[in-house]
């Protein structure tokens, strides 16, 4: 598939003005090449005008891209949506909002479609996601249920999406981004990262 083509079902983020970022999914492209993006039921959309600029951010084959588009329309009383133009220019971006540390933490995972949990361990972890070893049946954009057995914490249950896959010899590593996680558990992870970094600095010192 040609790079930069946004397709039906793809998850995207829209930057609408200062500090407004909404997560949605492409419902369908329109006949004139625009995109209809739907948001979670009950989401509150800000007031926008046709022609207003918006940034679209999406993940493609493990890479983040950002492109500029224009608002074409707005609607939806129950399930809100925006119609926007296809991004006419886009660039790859690197965005990591959370510090991460290398750590071997027991994890269990399974696809949201069902099946048995499989045991593995993290390679690194942050408040935004984790990297772990996975089997051959896991692919980019898969959504996984994960159970993280973090020290000094209750078992952390989260929903995560696979954003990249790396092959390392006979092993496969998956980078996961948290989609749904209790903020209390996210703080537990962030505190773990902070304490681990502190211990590493003390060893160096």
Image (cartoon, grey):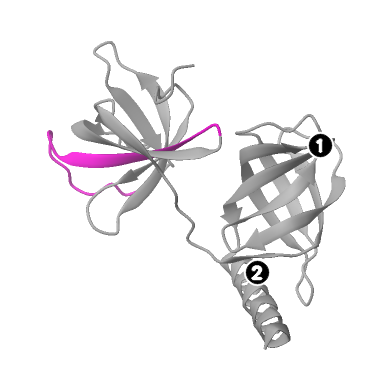
The quarter holding residue 192 reads bottom right
* Residue 51, position as x, y percentages in the image: 12, 34
Front-most of residues 85 and 198:
198
Please say whether residue 60 is one of the residues in the magenta stretch: yes
Q: Which residues are magenta?
A: 44-61
Above or below, comparing residue 88 to residue 62 in the picture: above
Residue occupied by mark 2: 189
Tell us which disc is closer to us: 1 or 2: 1
Above or below, comparing residue 45 to residue 9 in the picture: below
Above or below, comparing residue 8 to residue 169 in the picture: above
Q: Is residue 38 visible?
A: yes
Q: Is residue 85 left or right of residue 174?
A: left
Residue occupied by mark 1: 169
Residue drawn where x is 28% and y is 10% of the image: 31
Q: Residue furthest front?
A: 204
* Residue 116, position as x, y percentages in the image: 87, 39
Q: Secondary structure at mark 1?
A: loop
* Residue 26, position as x, y percentages in the image: 41, 28
Q: Quadrant of the C terminus?
A: bottom right
Residue drawn where x is 80% and y is 62% of the image: 104
Q: Secondary structure at mark 2?
A: helix
């Amino acid at each position: 598939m040609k790079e930069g083509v946004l397709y039906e079902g793809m998850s995207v983020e829209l930057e609408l003005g200062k500090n407004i970022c909404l997560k949605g999914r492409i419902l369908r492209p329109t006949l004139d090449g625009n995109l209809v993006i739907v948001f979670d039921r009950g989401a509150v959309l800000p007031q926008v005008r046709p022609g207003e600029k918006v940034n679209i951010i999406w993940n493609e084959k493990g890479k983040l891209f950002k492109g500029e588009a224009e608002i074409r329309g707005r609607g939806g009383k129950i399930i809100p949506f925006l119609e926007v133009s296809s991004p006419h220019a886009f660039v790859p971006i690197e965005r990591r909002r959370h510090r991460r540390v290398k750590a071997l933490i027991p994890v269990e995972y399974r696809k949201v479609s069902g099946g048995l949990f499989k045991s593995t361990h993290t390679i690194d972890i942050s408040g935004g996601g984790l990297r772990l070893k996975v089997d051959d049946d896991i692919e980019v954009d898969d959504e996984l249920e994960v159970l993280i057995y973090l020290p000094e914490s209750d078992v952390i249950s989260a929903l995560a999406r696979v954003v990249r896959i790396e092959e390392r010899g006979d092993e496969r590593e998956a980078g996961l981004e948290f989609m749904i996680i209790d903020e209390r558990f996210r703080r537990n992870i962030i505190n773990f990262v902070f304490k681990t970094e502190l211990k590493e600095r003390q060893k160096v010192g």
